[in-house]
Amino acid sequence: MPSLAVLFAGLTLKNPVVLASGTCGYGVEYAPFLDLNRLGGIVVKGISLAPRQGNPPPRIIETPSGMLNAIGLQNIGWRAFVTEYLPRLSAFETKVIVNIYGHTVGEYREVAQRLSEHPGIHALEINVSCPNVDKGGLAFGTDPACTFQVTEAVKKATHLPVITKLSPNVTDIRPIAKAAEEAGADALSLINTLLGMTVDVRTRRPHLANITGGLSGPAIRPVALRMVWEAARAVSLPIIGMGGIMNAEDALAFLMVGATAVQIGTGLFVDPSCPVRVLDGMQAFLVEEGIEDIRQIIGGLDTSPARDDR
Amino acid sequence: MGVITRNLEQASGLYLLSVEFPENRQQPEPGQFYMLRCSPCTDPLLRRPLSIHGYCAEGERGNPRCDFLYRVAGKGTALLSRMGPADPLDVMGPLGTGFDLPPSLEYALLIAGGIGIAPLPYLAERLAEKNTSTHIRLLFGAQTAEHIIAIERFNRPEMEVSLYTEDGTMGRKGCVTDDLGTELKACHPGRSMVFACGPDGMLDAVARQCIDAKIPCQVSLDRHMACGVGACQGCVVKGAHQGKTRGRPYVRVCSDGPVFEARQIMWSGGEQCPR
């Protein structure tokens, strides 16, 4: 039987399939629909220092092969999370990664510190796609220096492995990836959602109350794949790739361009059995190809010039 | 995975869909819903939520059968309407918090606007089963006579129906809430309950009048959904900090609802929602 285990940021994930932040709540919401024990890990909804109520509705709208969301980082705050949900999550045999965010570097540092005092968390994932209020609301992740500062601050505040989750809404992902690496990140995850909007031409109003939102789903997969490929060539860190993964073939593509593991988000909404089907499909691929270990796929993309046989 | 046994047009753009499930499925509560996958492709991407319209523990093939009544409103439902008997259908459910059926109810006033009739026949049947002395009255308003469907499910002696059409082609001409004031006067606060389903504007009017008259009222809401299970927070509405919405500015239609007590929701007098 081929091995699916991967080493990621100092953690051994039993397989490369992880659930993405914001799509599986605090884990327990999907427990009746999918066996969390089968997964390599789950990333819980972004946690902040204080609870946040999120944006007014409408918060979601379907788009061609995708969807926009403007949830607004709604979460119950670190204190309620560790009290009400962390103990329940610890019952599952899967790695628990907590996504965190803040409005200032100080907030990131503090929420990282608080969470690190509690057992049951295996890693922290830093969401840098939020506005930095100290820099006029520009997203942390659009600036290498801010990405560096936030990653460094979180790294200093915790003993846990730190994964920096990159925003794709940048001109060039490579300096941002390098900045996170230089700041001491143990790994990177990408991509977060792409900024988009849709309008209703009859009412002449945007569909989302927030006007713009984050685009996810199969529509963004080519962009995500390209950015993972670019980031993998720019840094030596392990990378979790995500963006519109719906099946095993999609997941394998991300591994081939350099990801060590993948996250599934929107795919979960379409079909709660998606993560397990991806897992089973990856396994079947290895068997068919006679490959003993999934790690042999990572970075295995062949970009040599095509041979002209004629 | 279920199998479609029928998908019949009842009136232009209105369909009755029956799905049988070969494996064990929990019996739904009235007011619960299912998330239907309308395409095996990535577009349209998201499942569509449809409330339970009818349930039979043993359908034609001896398996549990769920019935849905839906209106073709967009891409997903258009594709759904073209499916036929023997087609497989990927269905998640039952989901959500359904209607609360009080143990001894003297009078149940059901109010339906357009396709809002969908969850009410099953509710009426369960109310009647639970308590044979409950008197059930349905007020059903639609655009035109053709859209008045499913009322044969209200044929029992303890049930009565009053119809409204906007163009006057059946029942009274006007809106289903036109005589609500008078209707509510027949409700005793301690022994009656209003159950309503329909467009937001109608629910807003029903809710405000019931709250003013102090008649308990349950409303079934619907919103675009992504996950359908309470994880993504995409389908929220504003809570009024009452009962289960206390301390929670936004509540999820898919899991905290779709059914809420009227007083638990912050009504905004016709809040726009994408359809």
Image (tube, coloured by chain):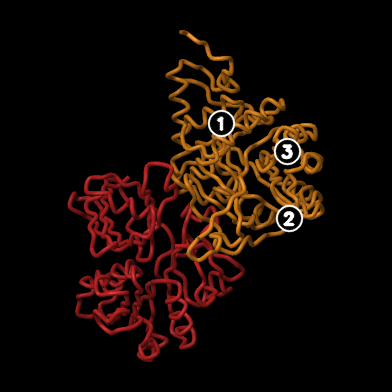
First reached walking from the N terminus: tag 1 or tag 3: 1
Query: Which quadrant would residue B140 be assigned to in this image?
Result: bottom left
Q: Is residue B115 left or right of residue B149?
A: right
First reached walking from the N terminus: tag 1 or tag 2: 1
Q: Which chain is red?
A: B
Name the residue nearer the viewer: A22 or B41: B41
Query: Which quadrant would residue B245 be assigned to in this image?
Result: bottom right
Is residue A167 something that shows in the picture? yes
Name the residue nearer the viewer: A208 or A186: A208
Q: Which chain is orange?
A: A
Q: Is residue A113 above or below residue A13?
A: below
Labels 1 and 2 in the same subunit:
yes
For disc 1, the chain is A
Q: Is residue B269 above or below residue A77?
A: below
- Residue A160, x across and y down, in percent: 73, 38
Distance (Cα) linking label 1 and label 2:
30 Å
- Mark in the foreground, 2 or 3: 2
- Residue A126, x across and y down, in percent: 70, 43
The amino acid at mark 1 is Pro
The amino acid at mark 3 is Leu
Distance (Cα) linking label 1 and label 3:
19 Å
Residue receiving disc 1: A16
Image quarter hosting the C terminus of chain B: bottom left
Residue receiving disc 2: A49
Is residue A88 something that shows in the picture? no
Q: Residues within 10 Å of mark 1 (few under 14, many from 20)?
A: many
- Residue B265, x across and y down, in percent: 52, 73
| Rendered residue at 28%/76% (across/down) | B131
Query: Which quadrant would residue A10 be assigned to in this image?
Result: top right
